[in-house]
């Protein structure tokens, strides 16, 4: 597929996505990055990959208003995304006039489309945890917007990492992994522009957690140790309170403990990585920060305070 779609649709255009009216947010040609390159498949960095479109669906042909959540599609494989006919444009105008308030509310809720790509990078045998620790620190030096070449520079500065092995498939026993996040409407040129690196992990830390219950145990230890170091009686008492909550969680006695019920409801029943475990604990604390009177502590957790992370590493043995 060529770049001809770029001339067909423009940001702000109304289109038909199957039988739904949608507004284009962005459209751009995507090219293979260094982490996509594959000699066996004949894929080279810089080669055209596909044309990406992001849009928000407003309503059906009958006027039923839909979710404002952004949709991301590869135009090369979506022949059901088409320009509106004159009749469809007239119908959309009538619906917008009839449902002016609903349209305004829908438009206000439309958020920019965001995507991410997961990267795996091999490390020297037995050095994945050390490599991850150094990478976490190095990431803090990245600018607000950066390219993959900037990430490669960081990777090459860490001796334990085999920087040129970065790819989108996990193929080694010793590796670190992370997600590169980007905003679709910001993309121009042949290289993606990223705004954040998240979910940094390594093979060593995948065995840290077994289930969501042990995530809760780690949360208790984090609060207890941080409370001891800062001399906070409030956090010490909270750690004791959460010990009782854990008993209720373990015994599935959710009627007697609302906190146990809440954690069980929101925590995914999966194997956790370092970052997903932290995010789960963070979300739990944020939901109950006012109730437990721990707003300051929650802010430290959310900002990933250096001392919080140090204790968290100690608790996990990472």
Image (spheres, helix red, strand yellow):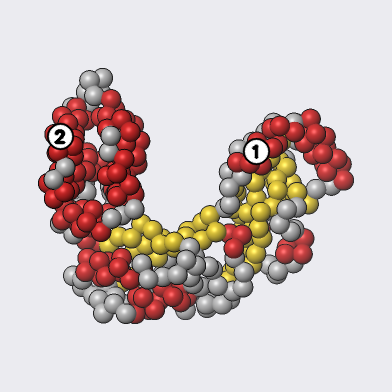
Q: Residues within 10 Å of mark 2 (few under 14, many from 20)?
A: some
Secondary element at tag 1: helix
Residue drawn 36% across the image and 57% down it: 199
Secondary element at tag 2: helix
Q: Check the image and report above or below for 82 versus 165.
A: above
On the picture, is 271 further left or further right than 167?
left
- Regarding residue 252, the answer to whether it shows in the image is yes
On the picture, is 183 further left or further right than 103?
left
* Residue 187, x across and y down, in percent: 59, 65
The residue beneath circle 2 is 237
Q: Check the image and report above or below for 101 versus 141.
A: above
* Residue 311, x across and y down, in percent: 18, 54
* Residue 24, x across and y down, in percent: 69, 52
Residue drawn 25% across the image and 41% down it: 212
Q: Quadrant of residue 155?
A: bottom left
Mark 2 vs 1, N-terminal side: 1
Q: Residues within 10 Å of mark 1 (few under 14, many from 20)?
A: some
Q: Quote the CA–CA distance across marks 2 and 1.
A: 45 Å
Q: Which mark is residue 106?
A: 1
Residue drawn 58% across the image and 47% down it: 111
């Amino acid at each position: 597929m060529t770049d001809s779609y770029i001339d067909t649709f423009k940001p702000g255009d109304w289109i038909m996505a199957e039988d739904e009216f949608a507004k284009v947010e962005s459209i751009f040609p995507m090219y293979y990055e260094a982490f996509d390159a594959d000699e066996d498949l004949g894929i080279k960095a810089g080669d055209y990959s596909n044309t990406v479109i992001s849009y928000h669906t407003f309503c059906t042909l009958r006027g039923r208003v839909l979710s404002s959540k952004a949709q991301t599609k590869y135009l090369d494989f979506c022949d059901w995304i088409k320009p509106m006919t004159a009749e469809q444009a007239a119908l959309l105008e009538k619906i917008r006039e009839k449902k002016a308030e609903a349209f305004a509310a829908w438009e206000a809720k439309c958020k920019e489309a965001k995507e991410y790509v997961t990267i795996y990078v091999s490390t020297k045998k037995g050095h994945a945890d050390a490599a991850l620790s150094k990478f976490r620190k190095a990431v803090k030096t990245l600018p607000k917007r950066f390219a993959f070449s900037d990430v490669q520079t960081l990777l090459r500065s860490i001796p334990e990492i085999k920087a040129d092995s970065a790819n989108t498939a996990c193929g080694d026993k010793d590796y670190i992994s992370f997600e590169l996040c980007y905003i679709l409407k910001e993309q121009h040129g042949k290289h993606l522009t990223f705004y954040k690196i998240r979910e940094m992990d390594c093979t060593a830390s995948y065995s840290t957690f077994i289930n969501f219950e042990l995530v809760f145990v780690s949360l208790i230890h984090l609060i207890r140790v941080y409370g001891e170091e800062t001399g906070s009686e409030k956090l010490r008492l909270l750690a004791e309170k959460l010990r009782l909550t854990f008993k209720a969680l373990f015994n599935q006695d959710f009627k007697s403990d609302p906190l146990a019920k809440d954690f069980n409801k929101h925590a995914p029943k999966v194997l956790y990585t370092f970052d997903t475990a932290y995010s789960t604990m963070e979300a739990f604390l944020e939901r109950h920060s006012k109730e437990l009177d721990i707003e300051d502590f929650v802010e430290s957790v959310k900002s990933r305070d250096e001392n919080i992370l140090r204790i968290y590493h100690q608790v996990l043995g990472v």
